[in-house]
Every structure is written in structure tokens, then in C-alpha cells.
Amino acid sequence: MPNPTEQRRELAVFLRSRRERITPGQVGLPPTGRRRTPGLRREELALLAGISATWYTYLEQGRPIRASEQVLDALADALRLDRHERAHLRRLAGHAPPAEEESPAPLPAEVAAVPRLIDPHPAYLIDGVYDVLSHNRAAELVFPHLTGAAGRPANFVRWVFLEPAAREVVVDWEPEARGLLARLRTLAGRRPADPRFARLVDELHEGSPQARAWWPQYEVQPRHGGRKRLRLPGRGAVEYAYTAFHLAEQPDHTLVVYVQSGSPELPPTAAPHG
């Protein structure tokens, strides 16, 4: 079960990170003197949301109080949250059914074989914490050293942040890495009782200054498809369209397939799945 104290702490950090990114001018407040911290003051946000400043302060302090859905909606409006951030806020505040704790099960052989059936298109199967459960030869060629060290599963987030080759392969490394970290943050919020997230985040903090700098910014983002530029040996930058398919029996298991833009298998008018 989720740890209530940890969940309140996560809620406090999320609220503070969103408050600090809003300037007084964005919400029509007059500029005042020098501010010790960026963004709105607690009192200003409480005023915009129509709630008590003391009560809001308790939320940011992680005290054991429960916000109603109406209060959460008012805070979301004042903080200008998008729909994914709103959903994340509700989960942290206990207004969404918590996901069951992850219980990794052996991957059926027929499911593990699926990426190999998709050659020559790079494909891999990941779980909810981005461990790579299965992949094909094309993925190995496009993402070198993806398999990771012996004794632990490959992990796509670990590869992006800690594998030196990733910065050569992923052309737009910074925006891609930031988006990936935001998706990891979203998934971690859904499974606060799963210790694998904490282990992975600790490893990223230890090995990546970018992860250490970006994690406190508390960006959240859902999993989605899109387009990505990858640098291939002897070919330079190549644009891929990638699509994510979720397994019916294990919704957290995702098959990711890459198809080169302009490939005969990809119609010119095809739009990425969001």
C-alpha cells in the first residue's frame, strides 16, 4: 500500500514546483519587491484559488489533511495545470484509485517473441519502470549497449541518461531526455509502493547531473508515440515515427515500434499516436 507520509510529501513537492513556475504577471498580480523564491507566494496562490493561506501552507508542508475535489480543481486552475498534471494532482491527493503494487511476472515466451517478428523495424517491450523485457536485433543496432550489465535487466531510462552512446544516437538528446524523465515521474506517482522506481531514480541522481537538476522540477507527462531523430552509423540523422502499444493483460507493458519516416510501411499522412 502507498505510504501516506511519502504521498503527502510528493504532493507538497508537486504543488511547490508548480507554484514557483507561475509569475505574478501571468495571473494579473502587480509586481512587488524582491522575492526570495521564484514564482508566486503561497498567500498569492491561496488568494487566486479562493482558499485559506494557512490551509494551503499545510498542504505544502505535507501535513495530514485531505483536500476536496473542489479545492483541487481550484488549485489546478490557479496553477494552470494541463490535464495530465491535473490527473497527477488528484492521484497524489488521494482522489484516484491507487494502482496495485507491481508484481513482476515471467514474460510469456510468445509475448517476448513479438519484437523479433517486427524486424527490420526496431522494437522493444518495456514494463512500467522502463525495464526492457524483450527487444529485436534492429533495436540493438539502433540503440547500442541497450542490453545493459549482466545480472540486471536493461532499462531504457538508464540507457538514455547513463549510457554515453545515447547522446550520440539521440539527436535531440535534452528534450527527449527531459520528456522521458517526466513520463517516469508520472508512472512513479501511480505506483508509490513500487521500490523499483526509487532505486532507478537514486541511480539516475548518482550518475546524471541532468537528472539531478530536472527531477525537482516535477514535470509530468503521459506515455505516447511521436517522432524521434536517431543518428545511425554511416547514415547520419534519421527520423523515426514510433508508436506505443499496451498489452491487454498487462497495461503497464508497452511494445514500442520504430518505423523510418518515408518508409513504404508508413503512409505519408500518418499521424503519431498521442
Image (cartoon, rainbow, N blue to C red):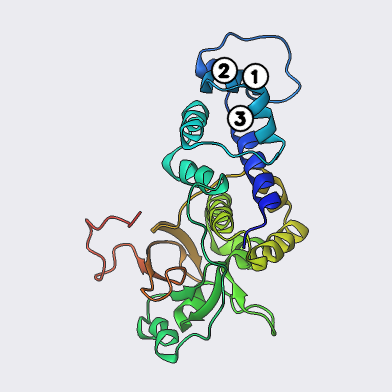
| Residue 41 visible to the viewer | no
Sequence order check: which comes first, mark 1 or mark 3? Answer: 3
| Residue 60 visible to the viewer | yes
Name the residue beneath numbered marker 2.
47
Alpha carbon separation for disc pair 3 and 2: 13 Å
Q: Helix, strand, or loop for circle 2?
A: helix
Q: Position of residue 187 (x, y in %)?
A: 54, 58
What residue is at 58 percent from the left and 17 percent from the top? 24
Name the residue beneath numbered marker 1.
43
Q: Helix, strand, or loop for circle 1?
A: helix
What residue is at 55 percent from the left and 15 percent from the top? 25
Residue closest to the eye, 88 or 151: 88
Q: Position of residue 126 (x, y in %)?
A: 50, 72
Q: Position of residue 108 (x, y in %)?
A: 45, 88
Q: Position of residue 73 (x, y in %)?
A: 46, 33
Name the residue beneath numbered marker 3.
19
What residue is at 22 percent from the left and 56 percent from the top? 269
Q: Amino acid at mark 1?
A: Glu
Q: Helix, strand, or loop for circle 3?
A: helix
Is 209 above or below relative to 1?
A: above
Q: Quadrant of residue 117?
A: bottom left
Q: For marks 1 and 3, give the one nearer the viewer.
A: 1
Alpha carbon separation for disc pair 1 and 3: 11 Å
Alpha carbon separation for disc pair 1 and 2: 6 Å
Residue 11 left/right relative to 132: right
Verify CB contact (< 8 Å) between mark 1 and mark 3.
no
